[in-house]
Image: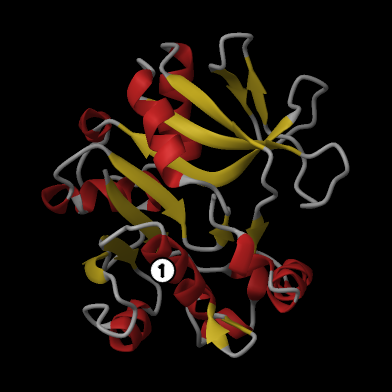
Amino acid sequence: MQFIILAGGLGTRLLPRTLTVPKPMVPLLGKPYLSYQLDYLRRQGVQEVLLLVGHLGEQIIRYFGGGESTGIRVDYSREETLLGTGGALKRAEAKIKDDFFVIYGDSFLPIDYADFEAEFRESRAEGMIAVYRDPAGLTTVKGNVALSAQGLVIRYEKRVSSPDLICVEAGVLAFRQKVLQRILPGKVVSLENDIYQELIKEGKLAGYVTRERFFDIGTESRIRDMEAWLKNDHLKNALPH
């Protein structure tokens, strides 16, 4: 499966620093966040990544180029105007040749991607999202996903709190290539608000339940959380054995 990283958002919660630095390039312990994501994928055997860039995307392209310094081939699709997460995927359609993973360019989930892919392949779902149960509130993200007994996503809601929303989306998705047919070219489309909701209604969105805590760099405090994790060398042992 292809690996696609969404790296084009505005990063408004990190203003003012994201006025001059794209969110995936925010430094953690002296290195751009995105370099950790690419290195983790390389260590799992991933050979090529497609980056969807937008806001200040030239900085990402200039820094990583073709990926020579990362050991992983890097290609790009660039938005001139922001089209949302779904619209960005549609714009890159000509470069998406297979079923694919989508990873948010501001979150990090230390999982075995081969296991995720195997579970997705075995399912009949058109899409699958990684979900994490966080009763201790480690991520400071409120629950936004409800699952059926069969592991299907039956509700995805970020605007309200509800007792059935016991899981948190963890920033890694997988889709059949045909999901792109649901997106009109040139339109602003959100995966969360539009595509997820269609798939849920049709019983075609599944959950991949992980016990691994995810990190994101959406706020300054969450950046500090991930930096603490990195300082304790947890990343060295994050690969599956």
SS of the residue at dot 1? Answer: helix
Apparent side of residue 84 relative to residue 78 in the rendered image (left or right): right
Q: Residue at x 50, y 68 (%)?
A: 10
Residue located beneath label 1 in the image? 38
Q: Looking at the picture, tell me which residue is in the foreground, 207 or 240.
A: 240
Q: Residues within 10 Å of mark 1 (few under 14, many from 20)?
A: many
Question: In screen coordinates, is 56 left or right of 224?
Answer: left
Q: Residue furthest front?
A: 241
What kind of residue is marked 1?
Answer: Leu
Which residue is rendered at x = 21% and y = 29% of the image? 178
Compared to residue 173, the image places residue 104 above or below, namely below
> In the picture shown, does residue 32 fall above or below 126?
below
Q: Position of residue 177 (x, y in %)?
A: 22, 34
Q: Residue at x 25, y 37 (%)?
A: 99
Residue found at the very far left of the displayed protein: 94
Q: Give the number of marks.
A: 1
What is the x, y in percent for residue 154?
A: 58, 16
Q: Is residue 160 visible?
A: yes
Please, is residue 194 above or below residue 103 in the view? above
- The picture quadrant where one finds residue 170 is top right
Q: Please state the horizontal and vertical placement of residue 38, each as a whole percent of the image.
A: 41, 68
Q: Is residue 149 above or below residue 16?
A: above
Q: Quadrant of the N terminus?
A: top left
